[in-house]
Amino acid sequence: MNYDVFNGDADGIIALHQLRLDASCTDAQLITGVKRDIHLLRNIDCSAGDSITVLDISLDSNREHLLKLLNNNCQVLYIDHHFAGQIPDSAFLDAHIDTNSDICTSLIVDRIINGRYRSWAIAAAFGDNLHNAAINAAQSISISNSKLDQLRELGELINYNGYGATINDLHFHPRDLYNALHPYENPFDFYNNSQVLAQLREGFEEDMTKARNTSPHLENKAGRIYFLPSEPWARRASGVFSNERAREKPDLAHTIIIENNDKSFRISVRAPLNNRKGADTLCLAFPTGGGRVAAAGINALPAELLDAFVNSFIEVFTS
């Protein structure tokens, strides 16, 4: 049995797309979810000889279940850019982990397959708000500015679809979105012909118009904090909105806070683009926090810790 396990954002979807264009695996079971659903290895019960490809989810967050898979003699290819902690020493694990702040999983895959589908990797980097990395990668191929803009929009729209508390918040299940783009070797064919992308574009413009009308709750020399309402449109827009605000003021950190149904808070953090560090340190200090140095989040911050989080945000990004 083969399993493809991938984050439901642009980076996870496009990383898998590149791999499968390079080496087909048509019988794999697809396991994914909303962007924040990162404990995906818990969904696998494998046997010796099974093959699992894992893309764009933290090894450290999945350590317990990864060790079970390895102990069952399952072959695991693990490609990621999030905090990993100690990587298990196992003959059954092939790990490609790079936590550099200007790398994403799709760019790691791009290295592995020698840039064969680099245009897709560029789109993923844009989706992960790694604009400089995307532009640098584009220098190795002949591409016009207008085509580069299309890759940027493609990555951002696919990434936008991954944000939500549950699958019901999304326009498309990430598995279905992956299946929609998989027939396309050329990202510009998908960009020009996909009705899926047209639907995402329409939803994106509607949601982002609402988000852009929101003023910051707090703004100081550390950064800006925004509260968005507990609505599906806000959850969908939160990631792209925080990326957009970060590009607007690259010397500041940014946080988007949305109340969950249980009165806890869902938080997205972006470190300053001009000093891409500290987001993981901040979020890992709180329950259900995780991420990487440049971008991190907290799934369910207890309400009584909200003031402590705001104070920590100011402290981390002021220093």
Image (spheres, grey):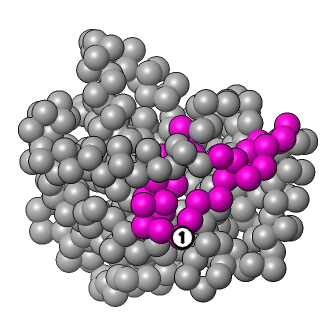
In the displayed structure, would residue 157 be above or below residue 189? below
Magenta span: 215-244
At label 1, the amino acid type is Ser
Q: Which residue lies under the disc numbered 1?
A: 230
Along the line of sight, the residue nearer the viewer: 279 or 156: 156
**Picture quarter containing residue 119?**
top left
Q: Which residue appears at 35% of the width and 82% of the height?
A: 44
Q: Which residue appears at 25% of the width and 63% of the height?
A: 172
Residue 173: % across, % down: 27, 67
Q: Which residue appears at 54% of the width and 70% of the height?
A: 230
Q: Quadrant of the C terminus?
A: top right
In the image, is residue 235 part of the stretch drawn in magenta? Answer: yes
Secondary structure beneath label 1: loop
Going by the image, does 164 lie left or right of 228?
A: left
Along the line of sight, the residue nearer the viewer: 319 or 248: 248
Q: Which residue appears at 33% of the width and 24% of the height?
A: 149
Residue 34: % across, % down: 40, 67
> Is residue 13 among what the camera can see?
yes
Along the line of sight, the residue nearer the viewer: 61 or 197: 197
**Picture quarter containing residue 186?**
top left
Residue density around tag 1, few if under 14, some if 14–19, many if 20 or more, within 10 Å: some
Along the line of sight, the residue nearer the viewer: 274 or 83: 274
Residue 226: % across, % down: 67, 53
In the displayed structure, would residue 318 be above or below residue 196? above
Going by the image, does 84 lie left or right of 182?
A: right
> Is residue 7 among what the camera can see?
no
Going by the image, does 126 lie left or right of 180?
A: right
In the displayed structure, would residue 90 be above or below residue 192? below
In the image, is residue 226 part of the stretch drawn in magenta? Answer: yes
**Picture quarter containing residue 118?**
top left
